Image (spheres, rainbow, N blue to C red):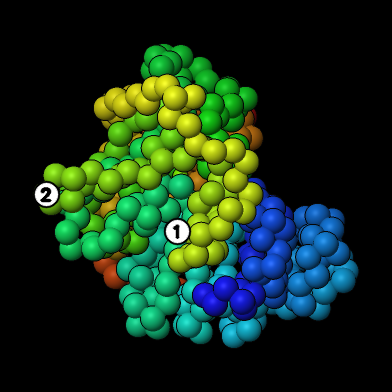
């Protein structure tokens, strides 16, 4: 990036948790960025406020009649608009996949905050990125950390992904079985959307991150390790073949990885609020994750190693189960049980095409909802 030239960016999902924080970063670095388009799903009120403030040329929301102050443009057209230098994909869910592929096909770099893109179609997405010379810079703090640590991937022995452990780290399995929605949403370190916060409580979030790391860094699953680190200061690490370990540290704020991803390879002072102090942090703890208590991580390794549509099944079943939990239709532990049940009955298809991935996703969701209904808690 030329320092004198503004980087042209669009944000898919500007009204969400990552999107709003990205706009805070961009506001601080307003001389570095020009916003091409913002998209806001159903929250047109906030989107219109953002349009007034940031003046994008284009915008998208579900109901185009509610849009004010920018030209309506479809997600697909936003992603194939070559005015963009980079697109931040900050929507959650499978809705992120096709627009991301479109942008990659158009040679536009991606700052990726959408998990489903790699969990559902990592093989296709990474192959397309390579083919089109597109950079995919991860926003998620763990992958962003690894991205910052790696100089030469062929010299890396293993990836070490840290996990805060979520709100139930030191709860017993019995206590976890009784967990309420409120307890599951009370994450000790990170302020995030509801679905990902529940995923952090079950540790499925870490499972999905293992699958993403496998694709992003082309690393076999047996070389991806998880360690519990409750302070969320070490965001992840890598071990080189010679035994050197490089970790990336920082205060737990999503502004830092978001800024890294959208300004890469430049670094600016930006929104950083205070300087990092080891002595203030005083201690960093690490412990081995308990996969018996948090079996979702094992399920994710299994899905990843199985490959093909297994990770599509994992993602769809888990998401439906999390939604049902958030609606208090099932208990906390049922999230795992239901996902496990769907995984064990799923007939894996290797190398599914994009349309097949969406078809499988749909089927799994229908079946998962049937199982939830049969549980008949409501
Ligand atoms: Mg993360």
Seen in the picture, residue 34 relative to 189 is either above or below; the reply is: below
- Residue 188: horizontal and vertical position, in percent? 54, 26
- Residue 247: horizontal and vertical position, in percent? 32, 43
Give whichever of 270, 221 is nearer the camera: 270
User: Crowdedness of circle 1 by 10 Å Cα count: few (<14), some, many (20+)?
Assistant: many
- Residue 162: horizontal and vertical position, in percent? 36, 38
Give whichever of 166, 367 is nearer the camera: 166
Identified at 11% across, 49% down, the residue is 242
Instruction: Report whether the residue tagged 1 is closer than 8 Å to ligand 1.
Output: no
Q: How many marks?
A: 2
Q: Which residue is mark 1?
A: 138
Which is more N-terminal, label 1 or label 2?
A: 1
Q: Which residue is mark 2?
A: 242
Query: Can the viewer see residue 361 in this picture?
Result: no
Seen in the picture, residue 322 relative to 169 is either above or below; the reply is: below
Q: Secondary structure at mark 1?
A: strand
Query: Can the viewer see residue 125 in this picture?
Result: yes
| CA distance separating discs 2 and 1 | 26 Å
Identified at 57% across, 23% down, the residue is 183
Give whichever of 357, 47 is nearer the camera: 47
Identified at 59% across, 30% down, the residue is 185
């Amino acid at each position: 990036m030329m320092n004198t030239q503004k980087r042209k960016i669009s944000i898919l999902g500007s009204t969400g948790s990552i999107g709003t924080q990205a706009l805070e970063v961009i506001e601080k670095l307003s001389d570095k960025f020009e916003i091409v388009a913002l998209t806001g799903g159903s929250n047109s009120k906030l989107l219109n406020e953002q349009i007034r403030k940031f003046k994008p040329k284009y915008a998208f929301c579900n109901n185009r009649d509610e849009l004010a102050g920018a030209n309506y443009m479809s997600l697909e057209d936003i992603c194939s608009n070559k005015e963009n230098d980079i697109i931040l994909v900050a929507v959650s869910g499978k809705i992120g996949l096709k627009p991301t592929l479109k942008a990659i096909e158009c040679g536009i770099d991606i700052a990726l905050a959408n998990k489903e893109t790699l969990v559902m179609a990592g093989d296709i997405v990474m192959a397309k990125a390579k083919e089109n010379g597109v950079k995919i810079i991860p926003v998620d703090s763990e992958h962003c950390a690894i991205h910052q640590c790696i100089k030469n991937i062929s010299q890396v022995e293993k990836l070490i992904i840290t996990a805060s452990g979520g709100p139930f780290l030191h709860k017993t399995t019995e206590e976890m079985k009784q967990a309420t929605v409120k307890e599951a949403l009370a994450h000790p370190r990170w302020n995030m959307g509801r679905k990902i916060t529940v995923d952090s409580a079950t540790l499925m979030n870490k499972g999905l991150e293992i699958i993403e790391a496998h694709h992003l860094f082309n690393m076999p699953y047996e070389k991806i390790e998880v360690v519990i680190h409750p302070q969320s200061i070490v965001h992840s690490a890598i071990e080189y073949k010679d035994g050197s370990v490089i970790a990336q540290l920082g205060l737990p704020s999503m502004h830092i990885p978001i800024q890294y991803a959208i300004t890469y390879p430049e670094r600016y002072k930006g929104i950083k609020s205070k300087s990092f102090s080891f002595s203030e942090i005083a201690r960093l703890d690490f412990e081995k994750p308990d996969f018996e208590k948090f079996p979702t991580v094992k399920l994710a390794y299994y899905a990843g190693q199985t490959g093909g549509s297994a990770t599509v099944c994992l993602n769809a079943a888990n998401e439906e189960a999390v939604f049902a939990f958030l609606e208090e239709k099932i208990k906390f532990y049922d999230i795992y049980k239901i996902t496990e049940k769907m995984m064990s009955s799923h007939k894996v298809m290797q190398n599914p095409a994009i349309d097949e991935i969406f078809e499988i996703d749909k089927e799994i969701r229908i079946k998962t909802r049937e199982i939830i209904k049969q549980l008949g808690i409501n």
